[in-house]
Image (cartoon, rainbow, N blue to C red):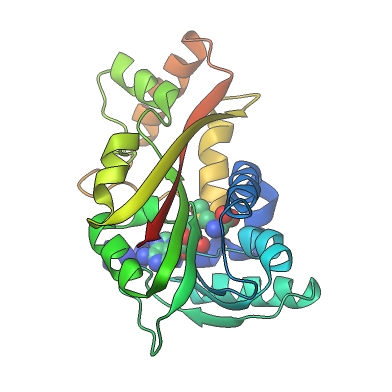
Amino acid sequence: MSRKARIAARFGAASPNYDAAAVLQKEAALRLARRVQTLTLPAAPRVLEVGCGTGHLTRALAPAIGGEWTVTDIAPAMVEECASRCAGAGVTARFAAMDGEHPDLSTGGFDLVVSSLAAQWFEDLPGALAAWSRLLAPGGCIALATLGHGSFAEWRAAHAEVGLAAATHEYPDAAGLARCFPPGMEVAITEEALTEPFAAPIEFLRRLRAIGADTPAAGTRPLSAGQLRRVMKALTRQGAASIGYRLLYATARRS
Ligand SMILES: C[S@@+](CC[C@H](N)C(=O)[O-])C[C@H]1O[C@@H](n2cnc3c(N)ncnc32)[C@H](O)[C@@H]1O
């Protein structure tokens, strides 16, 4: 199974129980939704959402800005979950399973391509952003939330203390994310720290597993049970009571 198929399978399997554990993800989606509402958009924008999950962003933003929505995720089970929750909330959209890195759509002309906490899973973010920009109408915007450099610092420090490398991804800093956008777009990036508290270190891993976000970074291997115990003890020794996320919010307008 390819890494991408594994990512889709893990998120798909987690979809029925995602919301109970995805507290930080929901918060990030709500914050992105508020930022998007400050952008200048047409009265009834054509919107493409990538990596919808169960629809935290869809349900927060679609009623606020209206328009005609195409809502997608690589995991078909997530798309179904999102469609059913949106129907319950009175949000209408077209739903499709699709790899957001390689949008397979018959039409473009979107006023907004929006995505919350999906892009950190991409293999080629600059390639994806170039593809999204080609789908934009003139003056259209990309708005995304993704993870930035410094996320999971406590987790990485605990690994380093016991001589291991964390299987987390390498995330860009704000300048690095800005460089991922195609030339000619007006890009603005803001950064925000969010923390996810835990009563015991193992809760961090349990949450990642519960939301399906536990596919290790490319080229890394999951820890053995013994290694995991050493990392947990190091986190406890370091007195960590939370894991930090560095959220990057990017908006980019096609001129
Ligand atoms: C952490 S969840 C975020 C979901 C939702 N946006 C939220 O804020 O709760 C990441 C989502 O990205 C999706 N995803 C990962 N890689 C993707 C890709 N290449 N194309 C589209 N969706 C992808 C996953 O299936 C998952 O639903």
Residue shown at 53% from the left, 10% from the top: 239
Q: Nearer the viewer, residue 45 or 205?
A: 45
Residue 50 shows in this picture: no
Residue 215, placed above or below residue 225: below
Residue 46 seen by the camera: yes
Instruction: List x then y, in percent, for residue 251.
Output: 44, 51
Question: Foreground: 99 or 61?
Answer: 61
Q: Position of residue 90 (x, y in %)?
A: 79, 76
* Residue for point 51% across, 31% down: 192
Q: Is residue 130 above or below residue 37?
A: below
Residue at image point 38% right, 69% down: 100
At 56% across and 70% down in the image, what residue appears?
Answer: 78
Report the quarter where the C terminus lies. bottom left
Place residue 207 in its image quadrant. Answer: top right
Q: Position of residue 213 (x, y in %)?
A: 46, 51
In the picture as drawn, the residue positioned furthest to the bottom comes out as 106
Which quarter of the image is occupied by the N terminus?
bottom left
> On screen, 216 above or below 85?
above
Q: How many marks?
A: 0
* Residue 111 horizontal/vertical position (percent): 49, 71
Between 217 and 66, the residue placed more toward the observer is: 66
Q: Nearer the viewer, residue 171 or 180?
A: 180
Direction from residue 76 to residue 17 in the image, left or right: right
